[in-house]
Amino acid sequence: MRKVTCGRLFLITFVIAALSSLSQAAPPQFHLEKIATGLERPLFVTHDNTPRLFIVEQPGRIRVMRDRQLLETPYLDIVNQVESHGECGLLSVAFHPNFAKNGLLYVDYTTKHPNLHTVISEFRADPKSDTVDPKTERILLTIDQPYPNHNGGQIVFGPDKMLYIGMGDGGAGGDPGNRAQNPKELLGKILRIDVNQRTPYGIPKDNPFVKDPNFRPEIWALGMRNPWRFSFDRKTGIGYIGDVGQNIWEEIDILKRGGNYGWRLREGFHDFKSDGTIHAGLIDPIKEYNHTVGLSVTGGYVYRGKAIPDLVGWYVYADYAKGQLWGVKYDGKQITDETQFMTMKGQPAGFGEDVAGELYVCDHGHGTVLKIVPGESPKPEARNPNQ
């Protein structure tokens, strides 16, 4: 047996201690600071490449914040044309990458005029104004909705300046029309269009199925159940999707050109409703959790702000039903770290990012927007029994 010298023993002990400290490293610390109250079912927060914040209210309004003040007059009010019961409503807004010059912004909403359908519309505004004239609306795309749930609703400009649109499978349960796997349907897909080709929109030449007559050319990816919230990492360009599950599994996916994410054949990593054939190339999620942990995933953002250095590179997401906030670190191939950050008292229906990369959470039930800020949550002050 080889003798271990004192020096070598010290080195081994030091390495073991160092590895142990790395494995037990505390997760990034932050808490939620309330910045806006009195909102009606807030769903989403974004910016127009200025310090202004824009908050989407489900009934059909967009509110604007300047210098942490919520302005009383809505930025846009289309309540009269929006169907907002259940999962329907005004669901998202995206400002054109060249908004400062062209004043164009885009919204996703559901309406019942005359039947229930999703509308993707363009509005035009003075880029410096705090209001938009609803009469400037130009409808780009309408998609019939057979049921009132699973509308998707997120729209976002990608790093390539194309507009990406998240569409759910059309609703009910179990995708009864198998729409997510139907290449002739826009439901159950991530779509990609070019809003700069105005007739009423263009199909990007590099869309994956543009030359396949069996597919709608707008389709970028398919096999989604309800991609309620998705985003692009502003540093890497990687797209993260929170796809809401059916009976057991919630999932986080990475957006890939031409990808098929398996619904309704699969839910997460698991078989759901097989059609008896083998489907090669279905894309697995990078993360799933079951309904003992949470019931409805809310996709978030990769943090790229400066206020919380330890949080940089973490993808922050949540569960709407349980109020839990988690984080994962993804290196482009696999998850390298993950943690549960906190459980909030509320319903995190959506996240948001400001121009500086700081993150926000929409509490749907309480009508508030909260900012993710450094440090642990403040402890409640002890009550003086003599008072």
Image (tube, grey):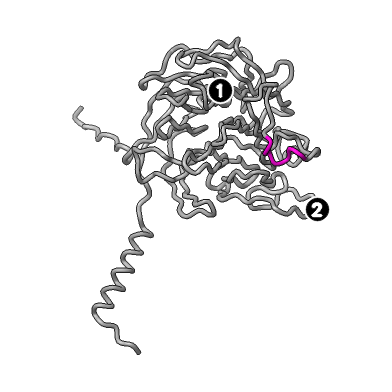
**Span highlighted in magenta in the image:** 205-211
Residue 91 in picture, x, y percent from top left:
58, 26
Of 323 and 227, nearer the camera is 227
Q: Residue furthest bottom?
A: 1
Q: Position of residue 220 (x, y in %)?
A: 67, 39
Q: Which mark is residue 276?
A: 2
SS category of the residue bearing label 2 = loop
Type of the residue with mark 1:
Gln
Residue at horizontal 60 percent and vertical 49 percent from the top: 285
Helix, strand or loop: magenta stretch: loop
Q: Which amino acid is tagged 2?
A: Gly
Is 208 magenta? The answer is: yes
In this rendering, the answer to whether 211 lies above or below 194 is below
Compared to residue 10, the image places residue 369 above or below, namely: above
Residue 324 shows in this picture: no
Residue sitting at x 74%, y 28%: 146
**Where's residue 267, x and y in %?**
66, 47
Is residue 172 inside the magenta stretch?
no
If you read the primary sequence from the N terminus, does the residue marked by circle 2 or circle 1 appear first? 1
On the image, which quarter does residue 230 sit in?
top right
Above or below, 136 relative to 354 = above
88 to the left or right of 95: right
Residues at marks 2 and 1 touching, judged by CB atoms closer than 8 Å: no
Residue linked to disc 1: 58
Total labels drawn: 2
Percent x, y for residue 273? 74, 48
Quarter that holds the C terminus: top left
- From where the camera sits, is residue 45 visible? yes
